[in-house]
Amino acid sequence: MDYLDLHNSSIVVDAHSDIPLHILKNKMEGNKDEEIFNAYHMPLLKEGGVNIVVVNLFENLHPEGSLKEALIEVSELKKQLDNNDEAILIYNKEDLHKALKENKIGVVLSMEGMEPISNEIVLLRTFYELGLRSAILTWNWRNYFASGSWETGGLSKLGKELIVEMENLGIIIDVSHLNEEGFWDIMKIAKTPVIASHSNAKALYNHVRNLSDDQIKAIADTGGVIGVNTYFTGDKEKGEVSIDTYMNHMEYLLDVAGEDHVGLGFDFNGYLGSPKLKGLEDCSKATIVTNELIKRGYSETTIKKVLGENFLGVLENILK
């Protein structure tokens, strides 16, 4: 089985990317005319054979500042997509099918932390109209809705109401970055498939950002998917991170969750100055994962599910 042939004949979904933050950072640095999505990210996505990429609005300011930054990110992304005949923002199933049929890169808008809507759930509908189709309640801290992985306390009353509204509108619930209390609060409420867009296995590396076996199984029970993350695969200070540690997490998740519930959530953000995983630095290297799965003895059916079919199923379920 040739890994490139298999990869190129598969649908590939990267469930977590910080491209909008890169766009914002580039704009704030004064490069107003440079279309960073088209000039920098498109070549990498195409080289890696990525068909669908989930891009996250991310802010770390007070709510008013976060709202402004999120709107800038959306506006700049849309402007750059308007100048790109090879990519499309996905609002609905028709857009998704068009992207796949016409071999365009489909862009799905997500939000990593709900700071931009402050404590006004009504604003969620506004972001939905702008294209928001997936969201994480909070990043690593506490906000009006939930607590991040480094904090204590579960979902607030407002957070529980937000989960219901997300499902009403058609927004995927993403539990990456939530602490365990908030995670289990969501599991009591959610009626649609829940994802962890970029999380790994706590059994292999005991880190607050990784998932316990019970959490992994609970996500699978909802029909959801876990995207394997290039971070938190081992202790980087001890040199314990590599493609092998990344693949070990993928293999473990496949064993615990099953082949229908594991995907890719690379979280490549070396372009933001964060450390890169050697050999798997950006999405142009996505073919390496296909090769590694073949080496580890996985079938073509399983590999295609991991590369994209599993996350594609979640999108098909939520899109209207």
Image (cartoon, helix red, strand yellow):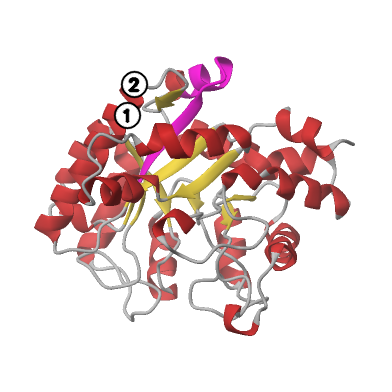
Residue at 87%, 52% (x, y): give it.
Answer: 295
Q: Which mark is residue 83?
A: 2
- Give the amino acid at mark 2: Asn
Q: Which mark is residue 80?
A: 1
> Hey, which quadrant is residue 203 in on the image?
bottom right
- Kindly check if marks 2 and 1 are in contact, taking CB atoms under 8 A apart as contact: yes
Q: Position of residue 160 (x, y in %)?
A: 28, 60
Q: What secondary structure is marked by label 2?
A: loop
Residue at 40%, 28% (x, y): give it.
Answer: 90
Q: Is residue 260 left or right of residue 157?
A: right
Residue at 21%, 47% (x, y): give it.
Answer: 30
> Which region of the structure is painted magenta?
96-110
Above or below — where is 190 with respect to 184? above
Q: Is residue 114 left or right of residue 171?
A: left
Going by the picture, which residue comes out furthest to the left?
A: 64
Whether residue 23 appears in magenta in the rendering, the answer is no
